[in-house]
Image (spheres, grey):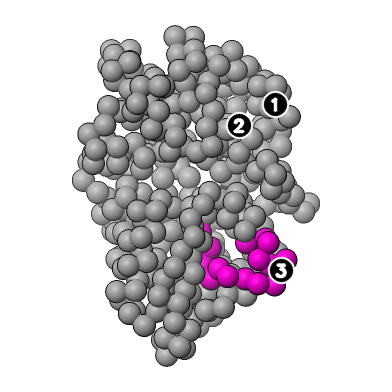
Amino acid sequence: MKTTRNAGDHWYRLGALAVSVLLSGAVHGQDTGSANLTAAKKEGSVVFYSAAPNQVLDKLARGFSSKHPEIKAEYYRSNSAKLFERLQAELRANRVQVDVFHTSDPALFDDLKKDGVLMPYRSPEYKNYPAKYVDKDSTWFVARGHFLIMAYNPGLVPESQAPTSWKDMADPKYRGRVGIMDIRDAGGAYYWQYTVWKLFGPGFFSDMARNQPKTFGGHGPVNDRIISGELALGVNLNYLADRAILDKKAPLRAVYPKEGSPMILSPVGIVKRARHPNAAKLFMDFLASAEGQAIFNSEYSYSLRKGATLRPGMLALDKIKIFDLDTIDLIARQEEVQKAIRGAFGVK
């Protein structure tokens, strides 16, 4: 089944065939050759599209260009849906600007691979990653992971009454004071929808709708409004909460629900029609290197590179109960799950 993406409302309807390789654990693909440094210097630049925070992208661009001063690293930042729209527009116009593409939508990468959009490249750095985080055909690797969690404002929710379960979001005491992402969005919004659907069934969406949650176009606004006191509780991402708590000492508490937190994987790969293919290969080497992964981790991501060190204060991976997502089922069920939540909320 061919995947259809409705760019207007960012609702991705994904076929059951998708991501058959994505967490397969997989055999390594053919090595397509290392970057040519001389050719990369002549190309002079690399363009990176990413859904990562601007703080991360600034550091990555500076770090790469410091390592390779003859090559300028430039980036464009948006959410996964808008990055896909931009890439598709460039491909249709035969004016591809992006060299390296990075989102938090693993299914999208499966589609891009099947459509021949991605260039196979096996970085020498991939040997430092568990096989399941590197495509067997070398078209991507997982550059970072982060967790979907809950967060609350301790000034509004006493510690003795702190939520512990995803189900607490439908508790009437939070009526009108709960924040979630727009139910029409994919990416992190759908990870939450699928998680609670899997745990509690479609009836939970009706419980949530009765609780009148406020919806936003991203987790960042939810995080900010919990801190400001507009919201008491909301769906959040660990790196937003960790930064707010550890860097800014904000009035926020992170909750890893007792049922488990899903890890959102963010793959990255080279676009086959890249204008700067050798610079792109060098950039992939940098992203996968210990130095590049340290930059991701500096903004509270979880590197999947063996031996990577977390920022002080972050919860260690072995201390997190990870909600085990069946990636193929996650994708196959998207139309069913989003139809259920739209119906519960009365949204077309």
The CA distance from mark 2 to mark 1 is 9 Å
44 displayed left or right of 196: left
With respect to residue 7, does 139 lie above or below?
A: below
The CA distance from mark 3 to mark 1 is 33 Å
What's drawn in magenta, residue-wise? 87-102
The tag earlier along the polypeptide, 3 or 1, is 3
Q: Position of residue 227 (x, y in %)?
A: 33, 28
Q: Position of residue 265 (x, y in %)?
A: 48, 50
Q: Position of residue 237 (x, y in %)?
A: 41, 38
Q: Secondary structure at mark 2?
A: loop
Amino acid bearing label 1: Val
Q: Name which residue lies at 62% across and 55% down.
A: 84
In this view, the mark in front (2 or 3): 3
The CA distance from mark 2 to mark 3 is 31 Å
- Asked if residue 50 is among those painted magenta in the image, a careful observer would answer no
Q: Name which residue lies at 62% across and 75% down.
A: 273
Dividing the picture into quadrants, the one containing residue 236 is: top left
Q: Which residue is more in the foreground, 270 or 179?
A: 179
Question: Count of labels shown?
Answer: 3
* Residue receiving disc 3: 93
Quarter holding the C terminus?
top right
Question: What residue occupies the far right of the structure in this picture?
Answer: 1
Q: Position of residue 100 (x, y in %)?
A: 51, 67
Q: Secondary structure at mark 1?
A: loop
* Residue receiving disc 1: 347
